[in-house]
Image (spheres, helix red, strand yellow):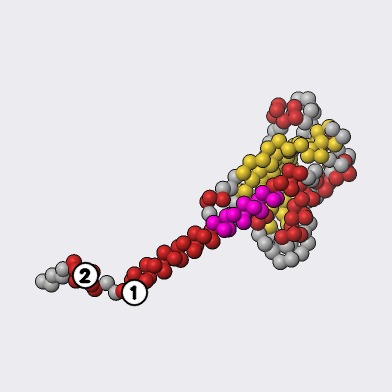
Amino acid sequence: MLTVGLAALGAAVPPADAGSARAQAAGAAAETSREAQDGSEARALIETLSARLLAAPSATAVLEAWCAERGLSPDPRIVAVRVPGPDKLPGAARRERLAVGPDEPVRYRRVRLTCGTHVLSEADNWYVPSRLTPAMNAALDGTQAPFGHVVRPLGPSRRNRSLTMLWRPESGGLPGPGEPLFSVEAVLTAGGVPFCEVAETYTGAVLIQGER
């Protein structure tokens, strides 16, 4: 039986192992630094986009400008892709914010707002059809036009209700394109009369840098 002392074992360790450990540590530190930098850049972009959305009367217009700025598609138009599913009833609190009685029709529309192949947000939309024109209602029922485009002739204003951050930069790195970043709830008014409430959730796809 061969017995080897601890000192001999220590002496038998190739010197290259120490260098390999240092290289691994340096690589891990560099990766951590890159992730921290990516997180900081993502946070700055999120803050920029959310500030623009809160300050603007139309989320659609903000997203189209963002698409062009980020080079997400050769054609930066926003398309509203309907998401099939059951209606979400407005409830008493939402009806109160929309200034409608319990029997006034309120329609529900859920869409994914896309730019090219990128899904930038998902939006729930409750609107009062009697406060829109017949042409507007037909467009919302039968086309992929974004709500903001359809109601633009009304000259709407947005009254923001909330902004909720869903992604935390301390998680490290960049969020995936389908990861929720933040949500915005707002009431749209025309001439001081509310006609729509929206709940929008923006995804990591807004952070993608395309060709410009």
Looking at the rendering, which quadrant does residue 136 occupy? top right
Eyeballing the image, is 148 above or below 162? Answer: below
Number of the label disc, if any, that sits on residue 112: none
Q: Which residues are magenta?
A: 36-49
Specify whether residue 116 is in view: no
Seen at 84% across and 32% down, the residue is 193
Main SS type for the magenta part? helix
Residue 177 position, x and y percent, is 62, 56
| Amino acid of disc 1 | Ala
| Amino acid of disc 2 | Leu
Question: What element does badge 1 sit on?
Answer: helix
> Which residue matches tag 1?
16
Marks 2 and 1 sit apart, C-alpha to C-alpha, by 15 Å
Residue 15 highlighted magenta (yes or no): no
Q: Along the horizontal axis of the image, is 207 left or right of 146?
A: left
Question: What element does badge 2 sit on?
Answer: helix
Looking at the rendering, which quadrant does residue 182 occupy? top right
Task: Estimate how packed mark 2 is, as few (under 14), some (14 to 19) or many (20 or more) residues with alpha carbons within 10 Å.
Answer: few
Q: Along the horizontal axis of the image, is 173 left or right of 210?
A: left
> Which residue matches tag 2?
9
- Residue at the extreme left: 1
- From the viewer's side, name the closer residue of 182 and 45: 45
Q: Quadrant of the C terminus?
A: bottom right
